[in-house]
Image: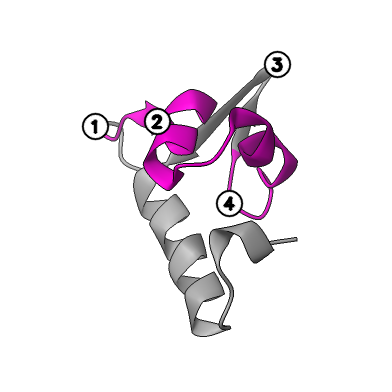
Amino acid sequence: MSTQERLLTVSEVADLLRVKSSWVYDHADDLGAFRLGKYVRFSLPRLMERLEGAESLGSQPSDLH
């Protein structure tokens, strides 16, 4: 991750994916979350990579386990 890359919050990821924040928390590891103490953050390129991987398996974001 580059030092210029801004990390996304759970709320921002939820808005991007059009899901509830609770869903993002439930699937944080599948989505490639970084845990910074009590905070959960996401790198947009890493998130997109994880979602593309799920797409290639025929999954939708709601199907991630």
Q: Quadrant of residue 8?
A: top left
Q: Quadrant of the N terminus?
A: top left
The kind of residue tagged 3 is Lys
Tag 3 residue: 38
| Label 4 secondary element | loop
The quarter of the displayed image where residue 15 is located? top left
Q: Is residue 60 left or right of residue 18?
A: right
Question: Within 10 Å of the Cα at label 4, are there few (<14), some (14-19), or many (20+) other Cα atoms?
Answer: many
Amino acid under disc 4: Leu
State which tag comes first along the sequence, 2 or 4: 2
Mark 2 Cα shell of 10 Å, populated few (<14), some (14-19), many (≥20): some
Confirm whether the magenta stretch covers residue 32: yes
Q: Are marks 3 and 1 in contact (CB under 8 Å)?
A: no
Q: Does the residue at mark 3 contact the one at mark 2 (Cβ under 8 Å)?
A: no
Give the quadrant of residue 13: top left
Q: Earlier in the sequence, mark 4 or mark 1?
A: 1
Please report whichever mark, 3 or 4, sits nearer to the chain's N-terminal start. Answer: 4
Residue at the (70%, 16%) spot, across then down: 38
Which percent across, then down, holds residue 33? Answer: 59, 41
Measure the C-alpha gap from mark 2 to mark 4: 13 Å
Q: Is residue 45 magenta?
A: no
Q: What number is the disc on residue 31?
A: 4
Residue at 60 percent across and 30 percent down: it is 21
Which is more N-terminal, label 2 or label 3?
2
- Residue on which the image places disc 1: 4
- Mark 3 against mark 4, which lies toward the viewer? 4
SS for callout 3? loop
Magenta segment range?
5-33
Q: Which residue is mark 2?
A: 7
Q: Nearer the viewer, mark 4 or mark 1?
A: 4
